Amino acid sequence: MIDIPSPESTAAAFADVHGARPVGVWSAPGRVNLIGEHTDYNDGLVFPFAIERRTWAAVSPRQDRIVSVRSGAMPDAAEASLDALGPEHVDGWSAYVFGVLWAMGERGVDLTGRTGFDILLTSDVPLGAGLSSSAAIECAVALAVNDLWELGLSRRELIYICQLAENGAVGAPTGNMDQTASLMGVAGHGVLIDVRAETADPVALHFGDEDLELLVIDTRVHHEHATGGYGERRRSCEDGASAMGVGSLRDLTEGDLPRAAEVLDDVTFRRVKHVVTENARVARTAEVVAKDGPRAIGDLLVASHASMRDDFEISVPELDLAVETALANGAIGARMTGGGFGGAAIALIDANRAEEVGHAVEQAFADAGFTAPIVFVVNPSDGAHRDL
Ligand code: ADP
Ligand code: MG
């Protein structure tokens, strides 16, 4: 088990297990979504950034068709053959790894005649906390395989491969925000993603220039996107779009909401309203941060949280308390981040008040009888790359 992972410690752990150093080490970051929740699978706008917490993959080619994988986060190693990688053959955490190779095959990479890999993973992205440890593992593996098999796939294609791994092999019906942020992140920048246009543009966030920090408050309420509410919300969006006669909710604007209120039942209307208004908030956030700087985006973050709490109904009491407490203690803006039903909240705060806010949230959680949260600062960081 590795305490503080790094490229070097990951290579050393690989050498301990396999008796030789890996051919290379690749890594991919987790992400925080600044704004734009449940908009990605509606062909919409999202504005996340890659964070400094990463997953490292130490990899060497093998002579046979086996892919072996172990992770510092898991007690058991796993193995699969390149001949049996499909969703019917894989389950558990290793499906995120085998799923990437399967998805490459599904998207046209010829797997015949190829040989497998030994893969060892380390990570300091908390699992299931809404910071996308799942994209970090997928993207690190995809980049490694792309290099070692000399596939020459573009990062855009790797985004779709990793998304297919998550949708098809793991069975989580997520959009591709996480993979896009992980593969396209740029230090100091957010990634403004337009899913429909297939663009991902870096936009400078200037947090440091304005002496701001972005706090993550991990509520430690674990979510599971392969089951339950996430898929239900996604179906509501599809139902709403079809009842409104459009291909996706991206085709609706705020001007369509009065008609939506007439056509749709109350619950579907509120789901649709969240997505439509959230797209508008994402566009506005990117404009405002570029024009007036990050201190001007607080109200947009707060409005996004209210929309998720009241209309999309994906918040939980721990997330609401984290947001309320941060705001009451001087945060410029705060919202839950990620798919919801648990996970983390973010708070944008003057750097000299960050510690105070952290303590206030810890105290509020203790008073409410909630599990102690984990509070830490994240910085907009570079996307996936080869380390060694
Ligand atoms: P999130 O992406 O928000 O962290 P998900 O539920 O989408 O949450 O993905 C978390 C799952 O991904 C874990 O439960 C585990 O199965 C898998 N996973 C992510 N990172 C690792 C890792 N470093 N080692 C093993 N499994 C991992
Ligand atoms: Mg995930």
Image: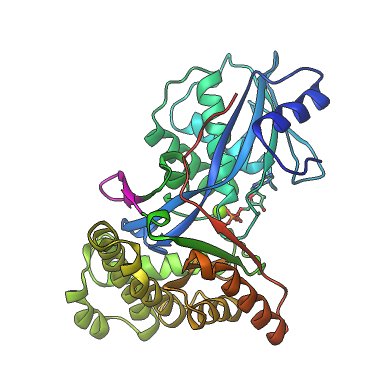
Residue found 56% across the figure and 19% down from its top: 148
Q: Nearer the viewer, residue 269 or 368?
A: 368
165 shown above or below 276: above
252 shown above or below 116: below
Image coords of residue 314 (percent x, y): 50, 74
Residue found 57% across the figure and 28% down from its top: 387
Question: What sort of colour scheme is used for the picture?
Answer: rainbow
Residue found 24% across the figure and 60% down from its top: 287
Q: Is residue 295 magenta?
A: no
Residue found 51% across the figure and 35% down from its top: 103
Q: Is residue 199 magenta?
A: yes
49 relative to 319 in the view: left or right: left
Instruction: Report the predominant secondary structure element of the magenta stretch.
Output: strand
Identify the magenta region: 191-205
Q: Nearer the viewer, residue 374 or 155?
A: 374
Image coords of residue 19 (percent x, y): 82, 19
Q: Count every numbered label the image shows and give the total.
A: 0
> Which picture quadrant has residue 248?
bottom left
277 relative to 142 in the view: left or right: left
Q: Nearer the viewer, residue 200 or 353?
A: 353
User: The C terminus lies in which quarter of the figure?
Assistant: top right
Most distant residue in the left direction? 255
